[in-house]
Amino acid sequence: MGKFPYKAENDEVRPLAANIFNEAFERVLKKFKTACDLRIRKFQRLKARVPAYTLPDPLITNDSIHVESAKSWYEQRRPEIIELFRANVYGHSWLPARATAISITSSDENALNGHATRKEVRVGLKGRADFPSIKLLLYLPNKIKKQGMRVPVFLGLNFYGNQTILIDPAISINKSWVPKKPILKGKAPDKLRGIDSSSWPVEFVLEHGYGLATAYCGDIVPDRRDGLYLSILKWCGEEADNIATDSWGAIGGWAWGLSRAMDYIEQDEELDANKVAVMGHSRLGKAALWAGAQDERFAIVISNESGCGGAALSKRKFGESVAEINSSFPHWFCEHFKHYNDREEALPVDQHELIALIAPRPVYVASARLDLDADPMGEFLATKHASPVYRLLGTSGLPAEELPAVNVPVMGTMGYHIRTGRHGITLFDWSRFIEFADMHFKNK
Ligand code: GTR
């Protein structure tokens, strides 16, 4: 029995407080240690030498036959490579390719002080009310329309919602989930207007005679670990569950969404569906490449710093690795891609073959010098090693054997630049994309 009045002889609170403090400290320490470990691993990896590696030859079939004609490329090898990417990297899509339901929700011919027509369009799937429609935002330059010409278009997904690409109070606000990112500063959706406008120089693109079409990637697959369950896997039901290891991930979904946007573009008489450049930055650059590889309606394909699983060779093991990308973003690729964690050499394909799938259509790959995670050299080499397929199909391939000097683009049917600076999409990048599009689209 205790004695009352109870008088503590020792300080009883202190050990308890010390425990709480210790636990909290240990938690912080653990977090810090993990962050440091990651940094150290990254640093070691960047310092490490690129291992000797062998790239699969895009022009040798699975049965070891050399592809010597355009016919056997199109009939045998191209479908084989697509299937290798589907089975091992991006997964198969299990939704019908082209049963698009379209409704135009707004159209204003006097946007941006009369210089542009702004349209908002919902692109969904016929008979699938459960499919969340892609809200496509388009700006078209009125000066091109006035000349009675159809408008060539840059099409790309955005990271945080349509209202973030430009300060224009008429753009509908995306109210669905967006990832927490410093750029968003914790602001409510209606306070995000124009917050990513530096990545989207809309007026600049319009001045050069191009339209711009964009949609929020999260309209298709929310970019979070459970994103697939909230979208793709939910829509496809059991069919996808049964084949989960080669079922599509977010990148497959985003690429699929770009093709659905293309379905709309084909139906809009103001747009030139033969002159669509599909583009994307970083993870959305991976999606643009995969969309352009599969869907030959895209006349030009542009990748900006798409790195691992995009334009960079995996087998070089430089920059972000397959194991790292699969652990940070387990929802981006198909399950089977994880089988190649720390075993890039076992991959039956590499990313130069992704670029080769775009041949003979113009392709442009852009890197940044300080964006080592995306492996600029690996992006250059993947572009270069796709050249034999371009040549087989009668075009010239990449007009550079060595990595070009910083800020000096090379452009032929294939184009590449490495610019100064870090990861991001800048006016320098857009200016090159426009030059490249001019080279291929103007006077045609
Ligand atoms: C990084 C990711 C890269 C790249 C980038 C981005 O964290 O590891 O592969 O895609 O994100 O999308 O900004």
Image (cartoon, helix red, strand yellow):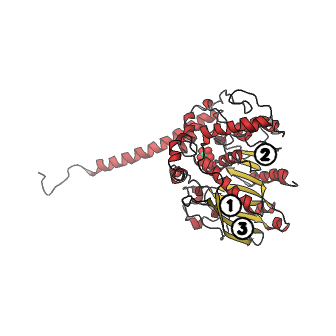
**Which residue carries the number 3 mark?**
118
- Residue 173, image x, y percentages: 60, 66
* Mark 3 vs mark 1: in front: 3
Mark 3 beta carbon near ligand 1 (under 8 Å)? no
User: As shown in the figure, which amino acid type bears the numbered disc 3?
Assistant: Arg
- Residue sitting at x 18%, y 54%: 7
- Residue 111, image x, y percentages: 73, 71
Residue 197's disc is: 1
203 w.r.t. 365: above or below: below
**Which residue carries the number 2 mark?**
361
- Residue sitting at x 16%, y 55%: 6
- Residue 403, image x, y percentages: 77, 37
* Mark 1 vs mark 2: in front: 2
Q: Residues within 10 Å of mark 2 (few under 14, many from 20)?
A: many
Query: Which is more toward the observer, 299 or 411?
Result: 299
- Residue 62, image x, y percentages: 68, 30
Q: Choose top left, top right, bottom left or bottom right for residue 104.
A: bottom right
Give the secondary structure at mark 1: helix
User: As shown in the figure, which amino acid type bears the numbered disc 1?
Assistant: Ser
Query: Would residue 146 be seen by someone viewing this image from the given angle?
Result: yes
Q: Quadrant of the C terminus?
A: bottom right
Query: Would residue 320 be seen by someone viewing this image from the given angle?
Result: no
Query: Which is more toward the observer, 15 or 118?
Result: 118
Residue 328's disc is: none
Label whose residue precedes the other's in the sequence (1 or 2) = 1
User: As shown in the figure, which amino acid type bears the numbered disc 2?
Assistant: Arg
**Side (left or right) of 422 relative to 238:** right
Calculate the distance from the C-alpha at mark 3 to the C-alpha at mark 1.
16 Å
Mark 2 beta carbon near ligand 1 (under 8 Å)? no
Give the secondary structure at mark 2: loop
Label whose residue precedes the other's in the sequence (2 or 3) = 3
Label whose residue precedes the other's in the sequence (3 or 1) = 3
